[in-house]
Amino acid sequence: MATLPAAEAMTFKLDDLTLAAQRWGETGAPLILALHGWLDNSESFAPLAPALAARGYQVIALDWAGHGLSEHRPAGNHYPFLEYLYDLHRVMALLPSQPCCLLGHSMGGILAQLYAGLYPDEVPSLVAIEAVGPLVSETGKAAERLRHGFLSRQKPQGPLQGYDKLAPLVAARARSGDFDERFARMLLSRNLEFRGRRWYWRSDPRLRERSAWMMTESQARDYLDGYRRPSLVVLGEQGYPQLKTAWETRQDWFHQVRQVRIPGGHHCHMESVPQMVQTLINHLSGDPSVS
């Protein structure tokens, strides 16, 4: 098997923290900005990015705050969903060139869709993998959610737990993601660190706090309505069933949107690289065969 080209490490220095990233491909090539999902990191795109680089693209994959090698938010801060959107806004201003495409998976896909609605002129093309708009608040549940969200922030953080062996962590991540252990190992290589003969989580424990606020359905539709260019939703054939249901009810939230399914589960972009590459190339070239 041919050795994949190594990624170049990058950082984006924001006002309050530094975000890490990885880059594949030639500088100056058309840029795809890749955004990973919750509790993943930029290794989510490590199988896909070299194949895209071989097709003439440059891929920059970001580590969200608190994930991978990025810094954690300062003490006293938390991870409300819309703060990721502001982080993305700041990163976009620091990129070497305007992206030709925002490519997001799961939480990253939702953020890409929202960002495109807010700043459509900055997003020539949009592709969301296993993402069909944001989670929304149930009517009559907003106050309860806020209380539970505040409570989860107040739970004391115990000392960091170390693990003697990596294999059980890899197996557990593979089970939770319902994918092959080689992909779990890739993700954990950037979310764990080895210190003093033990493995420790590098990701911020505050990422697991309950969300204190969610937008309403009408707010979600309003945010998404600003993007009028062609966009693509990619779903795994064995991906989350609720996303297939969401597609049936939400596709009219988007303008000029198409949907395509490829083999694999929620991380289908890692599992089915040739299909994902061709799907992206077709979309970026405006090929109408994507449907």
Image: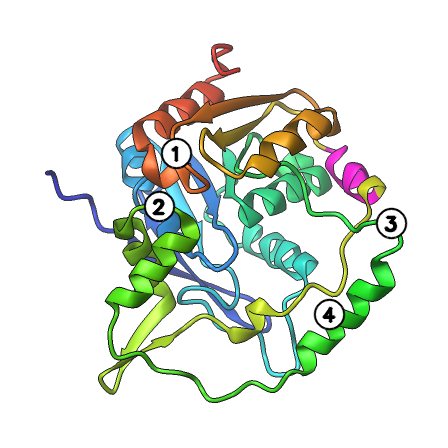
Left or right of residue 57, residue 249 in this image: right
Query: Is the residue 278 above or below the residue 17 in the image?
Result: above
Can the viewer see residue 123? no
Tell me which residue sits at (63%, 53%) in the image: 89
Q: CA distance from mark 2 to mark 3?
A: 35 Å
Q: CA distance from mark 4 to mark 2?
A: 30 Å
Q: Residues within 10 Å of mark 1 (few under 14, many from 20)?
A: some
User: Sequence-wise, which precedes: disc 4 or disc 3?
Assistant: 3
Q: CA distance from mark 3 to mark 1?
A: 34 Å
Main structural element of the magenta stretch: helix, strand or loop? helix
User: Sequence-wise, which precedes: disc 4 or disc 2?
Assistant: 4
x and y percentages locating residue 137 in the rendered image: 79, 51
User: Sequence-wise, which precedes: disc 1 or disc 2?
Assistant: 2
Q: Mark 2 highlights which residue?
A: 179
Query: What label does residue 132 carry, if any?
Result: none
Q: Are marks 1 and 2 in contact (CB under 8 Å)?
A: yes
User: Sequence-wise, which precedes: disc 3 or disc 1?
Assistant: 3
**Between 33 and 166, the one nearer to me in the picture:** 166
Question: Could you tell me the amino acid type at mark 1?
Answer: Gly
Q: Which range is magenta?
A: 219-226
Q: Are marks 2 and 3 in contact (CB under 8 Å)?
A: no
Q: Mark 1 highlights which residue?
A: 264
**Between 242 and 195, the one nearer to me in the picture:** 242
Q: Mark 4 highlights which residue?
A: 149
Task: Determine whether the residue tagged by mark 3 lies in a helix, strand or loop.
Answer: loop
**Between 219 and 145, the one nearer to me in the picture:** 145
Query: Is the residue 193 above or below the residue 179 in the image?
Result: below
Task: Determine whether the residue tagged by mark 2 lies in a helix, strand or loop.
Answer: loop
Tell me which residue sits at (50%, 31%) in the image: 235
